[in-house]
Amino acid sequence: MTFKDLHNDILEFLDKKKPFAVYSLPNTDVFHIIDTFESSDTTVDTDLSFSVSRFNADIKQDTELFLQTARNEKALISTDFDDYRHAFDYIQSKLESVDEKVVLSRVYNLSSKSNPIYVAEKLFEGRSRSFRYLFFSPFFGFWFGATPELLLEYDFKTHGYKTMALAGTRKSGTDIEWDTKNMHEHNAVCAFIENELSKLNLKYSKSSSENVKYGEIEHLCHRYTGNAMIDPCIIAEALNPTPAVCGYPRDKARLVIGEVEKHDRECYAGLINVLHDNKFYSFVNLRCCKVSKTNIGYCYHIFAGGGINQLSDINEEWNETESKMKSIIDVINA
């Protein structure tokens, strides 16, 4: 089915405040809708067709929370430049080498009367290389996005697995070598993935580098493939969160993020897991937003982040988050 074919179903679920999910896997324009959710005892939920977890949260616990009633939430307030500068300076004061980094995120709130179903549809158009989704949960709320980042794909028939290092951002079509700052950022992610796979005694092949285009920006990417008879939950738990959305060293970055970010990332940079045709997929939730109903329409809470290292420039980092948010802002305002 196309996304448009599902409009009436989506409206009905939202009206009844009933949990549901709609998704389309990369490289296809066929959308699937799920309206039955059950709890599972697995860690990364390979028994459910669709599950969600927040950034830096216990994945099993978040699977069980999907159906629970609404929680008391911290207000999502737009991050202003002064707060961003304070966090940026604090992060740089904590970095001990050029190889360390912390991913600093921010949120931007945009009020609009635009219906989020049609906004999501416009975002999905032309993004067939990304994982596109829309879901509502009584606990997590209403989210949609189109993320380019695969954490893990595992084939239960062949036991083949795939993951990627997706880090480093610049204007799309830049016909020069990647700069030193972005290379350090990207290489930290590669080193982390290779180390985690090696600790699991998993053999892998690493592709040559490629530039992955997303709207007006592009990311540096290496892809990893391998074959192993293993529970994919084990791989996903080892890799999540990667330095691409958290930082490196990971534990240190987690602590710093908790100290400097005033907002709750909620599902941003968390995982969306799908079981489809004997394959398990786990995607990092990027290029996304949460939608709240208001008295005059809707508030779109748009998230974006970027890796801060010793070579980072604050204006360039702020502009990078602007570029990442632009794809959603443009379709809201269209």
Image (cartoon, rainbow, N blue to C red):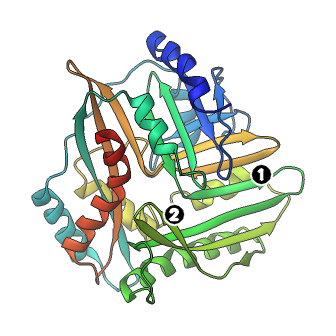
Residue 275: quadrant of the picture: top right
Q: Position of residue 329 (x, y in %)?
A: 31, 46
Q: CA distance from mark 2 to mark 1?
A: 19 Å
- How many neighbours does mark 1 have within 10 angstroms: few (below 14), some (14-19), or many (20 or more)? few
Secondary element at tag 1: loop
Image quarter where the C terminus lies is: top left
Say which residue label 2 marks. 242
* Of callouts 2 and 1, the N-terminal one: 1
* Near-viewer residue (316 or 43): 316
Answer left or right for 228 relative to 225.
right
171 to 301, vertically: above or below: below
286 to 14, vertically: above or below: below
Secondary element at tag 2: loop
- Residue drawn at x 38%, y 67% is 252
- How many neighbours does mark 2 have within 10 angstroms: few (below 14), some (14-19), or many (20 or more)? many
Say which residue label 1 marks. 231
Q: Is residue 87 visible?
A: yes
Answer left or right for 301 relative to 168.
left
- Residue drawn at x 56%, y 79% is 191
- Residue drawn at x 63%, y 20% is 35
